[in-house]
Image (cartoon, rainbow, N blue to C red):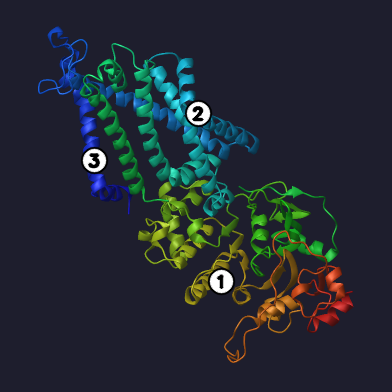
Amino acid sequence: MSKAPRLRQALRTPMGIATAILSALILLVAIFGPMLAGDTADRIDTDAIGRHSGSEHLFGTDALGRDIAARVVVATRLTLELTLFATLIAVLGGLILGVLPAVLGRRAGRLITATVNLLVAFPGLLFVLFLAVIFGVGTFSAAFAIGLGAAPATARLVQNLTASIAGTDYVAAARILGVGRFRIIVRHILPNIAEPVALFVAQVAAGILVAFSGLSFLGLGVQAPDYDWGRLLNEQLDRVMVDPMSAVGPGAAIVLTGITFGLIGEVVAGASGGRGANRPEAEPVVSTDEQAAAEAESALLHVDHLRVRFPGHTAVHDVCLSVTEGEAVGIVGESGSGKSLTALAAAGLVPHPGRVSARTLRFADRDLNRQAPKGTSLAMVFQDPMASLNPALTVGRQLAEVAEVHHGAGRAAALTRAVTRLGAVGIINPEQRVAKRPHEFSGGMRQRVMIAMGLMGEPRLIIADEPTTALDVTVQAQVLALLRDVRAESGAALLLISHDIAVVSQVCDRVVVMYAGRIVEELPVGDLADGVAHPYSAALIGAVPTMTTDRDVPLATIPGRPPEPGEESVGCPFAPRCARASDRCRTEEPVLERIGPGRRVACWHPITTAVQELEEVR
């Protein structure tokens, strides 16, 4: 549903109707009040000085015989102008201070954040009074003071919201596609924080109204001959005990307008309907054997001794991996084995505070130790498409952005390409679907959209991070078939991450098995059935049921649990769960060694015929 219908629907609710009526009433009074009641408000009548409220004068008269009700009506325009002016200053200042940490470097961003935190911790009223003294007594000086005084609180909210959105998958995807920081803020961050910011701004406006009226009441705001509601309250201070109704008019106007601002925020928020990469640290290059060097030279993606560190532990240990042109490689393992981190490191998307280091980390002819991936030659399909797609934008706009940024396509041409790509991944009626938002798609269709986004450019490598997780068997098969078709048509290589070895065997040419952040085995898919050498690989295969599995026999399970993050052990990390483990396994970690063409294993007691081959290599 577009924003206009949602707004109309919100305005049909009781709260929406009340908000519309109050807003229209205040707006009409602000526009026409000075014209209709201006003469009455300024007329001095010495015979009517100090009259109490009654039928002739609703709120009585002031010390010069002027009608207080008329003055309240006339003061509406100036009060609203100053309130909105100060609110605009608060919003602009808050947005600038709030998004700057996401634009600037880490040090400058931390400095701005610390400054905002310091200003927020300072008592707000004292801060406003301090600014009012600095700027001097006067109407617009008070407006500046109050606006700047409200900016830190707005900036704090924007910073928190920006930080939460900046860590999402769709922002990471935009970064890897080379979208600039300013465009990320405008297209991906600001639309997704609009709802809470709109609600907060309405509350800020109500607070500014009260604060400005307070400054005028204290004599620091609007000066004679001008007047706002706060100054009218000040003028009736001496009479409030004698004739309380003289203060009811301006006081009620402040309260009613403040409530209206809050209601506007609720309606706008309800109608909105919406909801960085660390560069690797280079290590000196260490020579490898001739065969490995030849493979590295011909590989599209080459990773040598990759490590991913977080404070307190190492999540990925010395991973060596290559993917050649057009090849499909699967990485399997239990949760926490380092599969996704390995893929994110290759894409330059390891989240802070992770640190990536590698002897060699190269994609095509780009050294990722020095430069992050750029362009559309590397595409990423994330695990959760709902988190990877921007909920505030239509699917068509998100796909079209790739063509606009990287291929210089116009808006219409980019949208046409998006329609074509959606049709290519099996989306029915793509012409209509491009105008839909992600929540209007099923899980399987959202995953197809993610694949289509990767195909908006000309990818040479597609990294798919568990693309079939949480999908039913039928949809899972469709997504896997789609990945095969995409490879066949585009010639792109595929790096498929999965915890399900059966899924990988249907799509990939080669399988890499990871455990505790290490590669424990690498082998061709054809050898999975009876040629695995590592006990962990055999256990993963044994846990997968087939059509011939005896239902009377319990499925094979792996005893124990994987190591916790930061849990370092001596020897083979799989030894506590392995039935073949010996004392050597518990004291000495095995090295990943080649046991044949396309085959490597890290085990002191490998199984099957690989034992003889391994002994020959040793």
Give the left or right position of residue 208, taking residue 55 as reference: right
Q: Nearer the viewer, residue 564 or 89?
A: 564
Say what secondary structure mark 3 lies in: helix
Give the left or right position of residue 345, taking residue 1 as reference: right
Viewer-nearest of discs 3 and 1: 3
The residue at the far front in this view is: 241
Q: Nearer the viewer, residue 352 or 356?
A: 352
The answer to whether residue 599 of the structure is visible from this angle is no
Marks 3 and 1: CB-CB under 8 Å?
no
Give how far across and how far down residue 170 sits, in percent: 52, 53
The residue at the far left in this view is: 55
Mark 2 is surrounded, within 10 Å at the Cα level, by few (under 14), some (14 to 19) or many (20 or more) other residues, namely few
Give the left or right position of residue 468, taking residue 196 as reference: right
Quarter holding residue 503? bottom right
Give the left or right position of residue 359, taking residue 550 as reference: right
Residue occupied by mark 1 = 484
Distance in Å between CA atoms under marks 3 and 1: 55 Å
Residue occupied by mark 3 = 20
Query: The residue under label 3 is which amino acid type?
Result: Ala
Quarter holding residue 306? bottom right
Residue occupied by mark 2 = 123
Query: The residue under label 1 is which amino acid type?
Result: Arg
Distance in Å between CA atoms under marks 1 and 2: 61 Å
The answer to whether residue 261 of the structure is visible from this angle is yes
Query: The residue under label 2 is which amino acid type?
Result: Pro
Say which quadrant the N terminus sits in: bottom left
Mark 1 is surrounded, within 10 Å at the Cα level, by few (under 14), some (14 to 19) or many (20 or more) other residues, namely some
Above or below — where is 375 with respect to 140? below
Looking at the image, is mark 3 or mark 2 earlier in the sequence? 3
Mark 3 is surrounded, within 10 Å at the Cα level, by few (under 14), some (14 to 19) or many (20 or more) other residues, namely some
